[in-house]
Amino acid sequence: MRVIVDNTKCDGYGTCLDMCPSVFRSDDWGYAAVVGDGSVPEPDQTLVRRVISLCAENAIREI
């Protein structure tokens, strides 16, 4: 599983960063970005799917 963040949609609420810092980080402007290439380790996949469903701006998606 891999995820991406659409920077044009992200409003920087930080929910994803708080919930799963092993996959999401903050960019230089305070918006969400993925760590590395966005690959999600097996143990984090359920949590990341929950993060995707909670993103207020639908800025995160699985690819």
Image (tube, helix red, strand yellow):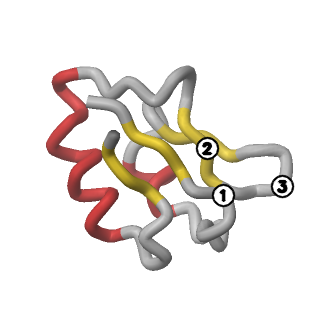
Between the residue at mark 2 and the residue at mark 3, the CA separation in whole angstroms equals 10 Å
Q: Which residue is mark 1?
A: 7
The residue tagged 2 is 33
In the image, what residue occupies the spot 45% across and 55% down? 16
What type is the residue that disc 2 sits on? Ala
Q: Which residue is mark 3?
A: 29
Task: Find residue 13 and report its horizontal and vertical position in percent.
Answer: 59, 70
Residue at 60% from the left image edge and 70% from the top image edge: 9
Which quadrant would residue 25 be assigned to in this image?
top right
Q: What's under tag 1, amino acid-wise? A: Asn
Residue 24 percent coordinates (x, y): 51, 41
Q: Is residue 40 left or right of residue 11?
A: left
Callout 2 crowding tier (Cα within 10 Å): few <14, some 14–19, many ≥20: many
Tell me, yes or no, whether the two marked residues, 1 and 2, touch with CB atoms within 8 Å.
Answer: yes
Pointer 3 local density, CA inside 10 Å: few below 14, some 14–19, many at least 20? few
Q: Quadrant of the C terminus?
A: top left
